[in-house]
Amino acid sequence: MVISTELCALSEYRIYPGHGKLMIRRDGKPIWLGSSKAYSLTVQRKKAAKLVWTQAWRRLHKKGLSETAAKKRTRRANKVQRAVVGASLEDIKKKAAEKSSVRSAAREAALKEMKERKAANKAKSGGKGNVPKGGAQFQKVPKHMGGRNKRGGTQR
């Protein structure tokens, strides 16, 4: 035999025949409340989600889900190597396979070649270095020593 039960509007517990109260809301909607506690809290307009013993709170805080459903496993995205604008995929794989000593030696050779090129450029230009365009050389004066105006000193 099947017994028709109602659900409490606040706690969402089952209400068996002969128990609970039926309250009609202002808008005319009938609400079943399982206990005087549920009735009192509904009249006080308390939110079911803020009451720890209600099903709404348990649903909100993910309680009691472990027995119903196991955790879903997330699939990790596989890494895919792509070619970059400057280098093809084969070049990248070749560089990755190289030993670090070979790479460092190549880097040092490139640095040495750059330094030689700079020295050649300096020798070709006459070895002036960096002289200001105006011709006269200005000595740098720190701001706090009064380089900007006649008074100098600290700002007031």
Image: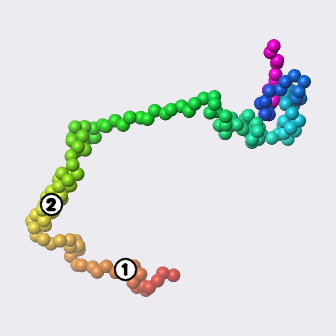
Q: Residue at x 23, y 78 (%)?
A: 136
Expressed as whole percent of the image width and height from the top left, the position of residue 150 reads 40, 85
- Residue type at mark 2 is Lys
Residue 55, label in figure: none
- Residue type at mark 1 is Pro
The quadrant holding residue 31 is: top right
Magenta residues, as a range? 1-8
Expressed as whole percent of the image width and height from the top left, the position of residue 137 reads 24, 79
Q: Which of marks 1 and 2 is in front?
A: 2
24 or 125: nearer the viewer: 24
150 or 80: nearer the viewer: 80
Q: Which residue is drawn at 46% across and 83% down?
A: 154
Colour option used: rainbow
Is residue 67 positioned above or below 116 on the image? above
Q: Which residue is drawn at 13% across and 65% down?
A: 119
Q: Which residue is drawn at 77% across and 30% down?
A: 12
Residue 142, label in figure: 1
Label 2 packing within 10 angstroms: few (<14), some (14-19), many (20+): few
Secondary structure of residue under mark 2 = helix
25 or 156: nearer the viewer: 25
Tell me: 139 left or right of 150: left
Tell me: 120 left or right of 148: left
Tell me: 36 left or right of 156: right
Expressed as whole percent of the image width and height from the top left, the position of residue 148 reads 39, 79
Secondary structure of residue under mark 1 = loop
Q: Quadrant of the N terminus?
A: top right
Residue 39 among magenta residues? no
The quadrant holding residue 45 is: top right
Marks 1 and 2 sit apart, C-alpha to C-alpha, by: 37 Å
Q: Which residue ends up furthest to the top in the rendered image?
A: 1
Residue 112, label in figure: 2
